[in-house]
Image: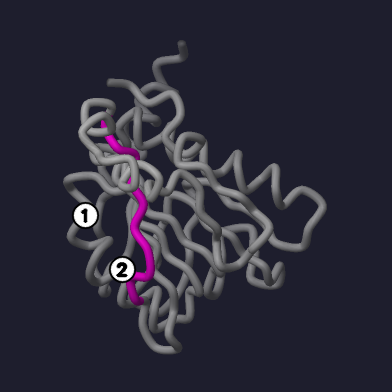
Amino acid sequence: MDTNLAYQYEDYQRSELIGGKLVMMSPAATNHVIISGNIYRLFSNYLHGKPCTPIADGVTVYLTDEDHFVPDFMVVCDRDKLKGDGVHGTPDLVVEVLSPSTVKRDRTHKKDIYGRCGVREYWLVSPADKTIEVYRNTGAELVLCDAYSIYPDWMLPRLTESERAAVVTHFKCSLFDDLDISLDDIFERLLP
């Protein structure tokens, strides 16, 4: 490997502008990247040939002068917002995969800004807990509407028959009511 490229790669660090402050992004853990990829694949397959665009991790969203975020996944239905350097305007769906260093920002400042700017649906995905929180916009803020979990194998036998019957394994995105989303597909291939 060319050593110049190695040094350039090590010097490259991704950042976000959060409340006017430059915040360096931590390197993503393997399960974080796997989940982001699984979500991208699911939406990319579904949106093939449709007007909305799925966008994988690494693209900046310019929301306000003080808030430029890099979500783990997003869907943009207005192609005029797509520019060579990122998304200029509000995505329709934003997904953040939680990590210990980002969980507070993702649940507070970023969620508030996404809500005020008009993101229609916002997901917080926890690799550790295998949970997805789905927030929907009420017109001025994002409000928790649903939460989904993959139950650990040891827990299922302890549930009653009616509790097992009530376990949700699939859900819908409010933007695409004919897209069936499986929790197993989102959390597929995670490392133990």
Q: Position of residue 92 (x, y in %)?
A: 56, 69
Expressed as whole percent of the image width and height from the top left, the position of residue 5 reads 44, 23
- The kind of residue on which mark 1 rests is Val
Give the quadrant of residue 79. bottom right
Taking the image as shown, residue 52 lies to the left or right of residue 36, namely right
Residue 180 sits above or below residue 19 on the image: above
Q: Earlier in the sequence, mark 2 or mark 1?
A: 1
Which residue, as the protein is rendered here, is positioned at the far bottom?
139
Q: Which residue is mark 2?
A: 110
Q: Which mark is on residue 103?
A: 1
* Image height of 82 relative to 64, above or below: above
Task: Inspect the image, locate mark 2, and give the three-letter code of the amino acid beneath it.
Answer: Lys
Image quadrant containing the C terminus: top left
Q: Which SS class for mark 1?
A: helix
Identify the residue at horizontal 25%, vertical 71% (top origin).
109
Q: Residue furthest front?
A: 161
